[in-house]
Image: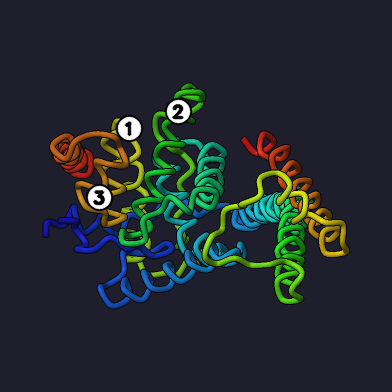
Amino acid sequence: MSPAGHHGSSAAGPVPADGAASVEIGAVRRAVLAVRGGNGEAFGPIVERYQQRLFGLAMMMTRHREGAEEVTQDAFVRAFSRLHLYDESRPFYPWLATIAVRLAQNWLRSHGRESQRVSPLFEPDREPSSPNEPVDSLITIERERQLWQSVAALPSGERTAVVLYYRDGMKVNDVARALGVTGGTVKTLLFRARKKLRSALETP
Amino acid sequence: MNPLASELQCLQGPTAPAGMSATIASRIARIDEQRQTTASAVREDVGAASRPGRLAWFSVLLGLSLGVGAQVYRLAAGELPLDLISLRIAGGLQSVVDLAQPSPAMAVLGGGVLLALAGTLALQREVPQHL
């Protein structure tokens, strides 16, 4: 069971509700069929829909902005090239995320030293707009920043599992397939990650 | 669900670079263009390769049609006696020579046979190219 109860994912925000997810799945399926039918431009909406989410995943894995951009681009290009291998009966995002995870793992193998211990490049989407902005909003932004950096400080497997399972709403089996491990290993990674995150977020 | 899990579901990451989708679109467009170019080249190659094959088949069929047509004409015109009771050639080699008397129908038959043979040989020459 995924935390969000489905496999879909939105462009940037939280995972959509069931109704929105089914609309999203339909839209992606139509785009996939159009691309398979020879209309390459139909892949554009897929890129628009998933680029933010995939970039976040790549950023979390590589902890390197240029590396994440390279991985995200390559993931979309590879997905386009191998779209004939995608099984329509399964959700699209886990398939795409699996490609991105493999590419990020390859990137880490060749550029391991460039990956930073903690990503300093987190820029929340919602910056304080004015000095009079409510304190609650500023606290939320700071909390998001802190949460991202805490997750980014986890070991590679744990932070990837957290992003795929919690943020992207993927099932344990799908996360396991993406990481190339068993479901039991994913549960262990998530358990360890939660423990470390609680400890990190409670520390002032 | 515990508060940590709810927070993680809303985990916001860094914003993707502004021009990234355009770069991806251009890379995909290049691949798409290459695919279409390759596909049309393959179609042209297949078309060009199949032209001699079609010509050979055409000559085989035309040759057979001419040969059979000529014999049907001879039967219809009464030039060729048809013995439905005994189809074997009774008079030996002489009967075969008598059967193949020089006539326009025999010339057409000969031409047809030659054409069919040429087509068959051409087809046989093509086979190894596709293996």
> The disc labelled 2 sits on which kind of residue?
Leu
Q: Quadrant of the N terminus of chain A?
A: bottom left
The residue identified by callout 2 is A108
**Residue B14 percent coordinates (x, y):** 46, 51
**At which x and y percent is residue A95?**
37, 50
Front residue of this view, candidates B124 and A38 = B124
Please report whichever mark, 3 or 1, sits nearer to the chain's N-terminal start.
Answer: 1
Mark 1 is surrounded, within 10 Å at the Cα level, by few (under 14), some (14 to 19) or many (20 or more) other residues, namely: some
* Residue A165, numbered circle: 3
CB atoms of marks 2 and 1 within 8 Å = yes
Side of B40 where A6 appears, left or right: left
Location of the C terminus of chain A by quadrant is top left
Secondary structure of residue under mark 3: helix
Nearest to the observer: residue A159 or residue A197: A159
Callout 3 amino acid: Tyr
Q: Earlier in the sequence, mark 2 or mark 1?
A: 2
Which chain does tag 3 point to?
Answer: A
Distance Cα–Cα, label 3 vs label 2: 21 Å
Q: Chain of mark 1?
A: A
In the rendered image, which residue does mark 1 sit on? Answer: A156
Q: Is residue A44 visible?
A: yes
State which chain disc 2 sits on: A
